[in-house]
Image (cartoon, rainbow, N blue to C red):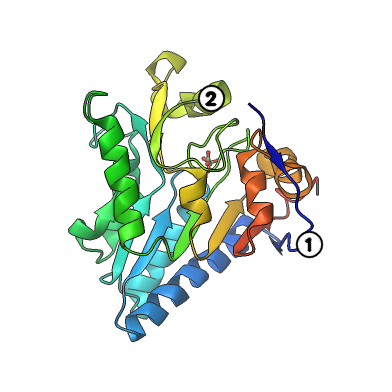
């Protein structure tokens, strides 16, 4: 059932950049600053991380900072947003593979501090697995920072249209547009999994800082809805309008329809 909420808030915070590189550098530097601040305090930085084309530039800059500017990931604990179900961690389409390729194998993060939903098992026990993933995030005090992309249908993580604002980590059915957009990576539509494990909208909303990064023309229509449209479960990203700690980071192409 579609649900909407009203907000009187005007804090629809936007950060607009001329191109994808500038937007990605901004996000990477926010993350680096948080990691360094936490390190100075002798604390861990709990990061919620995203996959897809969008964050690649962010990860590239974080790797550069690690290699050239002494940024260490030893105090980072990471939680990825989602993973296809079922999939083997070594499959090239898996998000475990993605994270290794685009970030983890290049930096000094400790293996035991990486958390990505493991979906290499039958549906039996999955509810408990999701509960444990959720509990682990909350036992660390929740995410210090959450990085998000956005699907062309407004999804955040794999919280597809219709996802409840109170949702937590769970098994979800993938939307047809999401599967269509994943077709190129999998080779054909029938190879794209129909399900995934995703952290929930509520899980995301508890993060202390949230940046949603949107790049390119193909995200412009959904960004118009997410930022200026009604806050509705039909566009899960619109929920961020109601969160004071959330910001939308866009390049000029993604901001074209605002
Ligand atoms: P993309 O995916 O970065 O590959 O566009 C984003 C998403 O679906 O969240």
Q: Is residue 59 above or below residue 162?
A: below
Disc 2 CB within 8 Å of nearest ligand 1 atom: no
Q: Is residue 196 above or below residue 25?
A: above
Q: Residues within 10 Å of mark 1 (few under 14, many from 20)?
A: few
Task: Name the one closer to the observer, 101 or 153.
Answer: 153
Q: Position of residue 43 (x, y in %)?
A: 31, 77
Q: Position of residue 115 (x, y in %)?
A: 28, 51
Disc 1 CB within 8 Å of nearest ligand 1 atom: no
Q: Is residue 39 above or below residue 127?
A: below
Which dot marks residue 10?
1
Residue drawn at (26%, 38%) of the image: 129
Q: CA distance from mark 2 to mark 1?
A: 31 Å
Q: How many marks?
A: 2
Q: Position of residue 111 (x, y in %)?
A: 19, 57
The part of the image, by quadrant, that contains residue 109 is bottom left
Residue drawn at (54%, 47%) of the image: 149
For this orientation, the residue located farthest to the bottom is 40
Q: Quick one: quadrant of the N terminus?
A: top right
Task: Classify mark 2: helix, strand or loop.
Answer: loop
Can residue 209 be seen from the camera position used here? yes
Q: Is residue 110 left or right of residue 191?
A: left
Q: Is residue 144 above or below residue 36?
A: above
Query: Which mark is nearer the camera, 2 or 1?
Result: 1
User: Could you tell me if the residues under marks 2 and 1 are in contact, i.e. CB atoms within 8 Å?
Assistant: no
For this orientation, the residue located farthest to the top is 190
- Name the residue tied to disc 2: 175
Q: Is residue 160 left or right of residue 38?
A: right
Q: Residues within 10 Å of mark 2 (few under 14, many from 20)?
A: some
Residue drawn at (62%, 38%) of the image: 154
Task: Classify mark 1: helix, strand or loop.
Answer: loop
Can residue 105 be seen from the camera position used here? no
The part of the image, by quadrant, that contains residue 152 is top right
């Amino acid at each position: 059932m579609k649900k909407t909420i009203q907000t009187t808030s005007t804090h629809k915070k936007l950060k607009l950049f001329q191109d994808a590189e500038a937007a990605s550098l901004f996000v990477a530097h926010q993350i680096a600053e948080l990691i360094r601040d936490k390190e100075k305090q002798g604390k861990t930085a709990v990061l919620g991380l995203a996959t897809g084309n969008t964050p690649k530039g962010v990860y590239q800059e974080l790797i550069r900072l690690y290699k050239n500017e002494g940024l260490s990931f030893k105090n980072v604990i990471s939680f990825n947003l989602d993973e296809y179900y079922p999939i083997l961690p070594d499959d090239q389409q898996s998000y475990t593979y993605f994270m290794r390729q685009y970030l983890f194998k290049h930096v000094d993060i400790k293996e035991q501090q990486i958390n990505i939903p493991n979906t290499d098992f039958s549906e039996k026990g999955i509810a408990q697995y999701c509960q444990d993933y959720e509990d682990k995030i909350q036992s660390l005090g929740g995410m210090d920072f959450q990085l998000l992309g956005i699907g062309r249908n407004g999804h955040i993580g794999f919280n597809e249209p219709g996802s409840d604002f109170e949702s937590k980590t769970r098994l979800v059915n993938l939307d047809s547009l999401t599967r269509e957009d994943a077709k190129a990576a999998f080779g054909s539509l029938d190879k794209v999994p129909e399900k995934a494990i995703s952290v929930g909208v509520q899980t995301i909303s508890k993060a202390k800082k949230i940046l949603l990064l949107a790049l390119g023309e193909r995200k412009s229509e959904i960004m118009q809805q997410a930022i200026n449209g009604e806050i509705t479960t039909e566009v899960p990203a619109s929920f961020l309008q109601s969160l004071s700690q959330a910001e939308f980071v866009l390049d000029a192409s993604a901001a074209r329809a605002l």
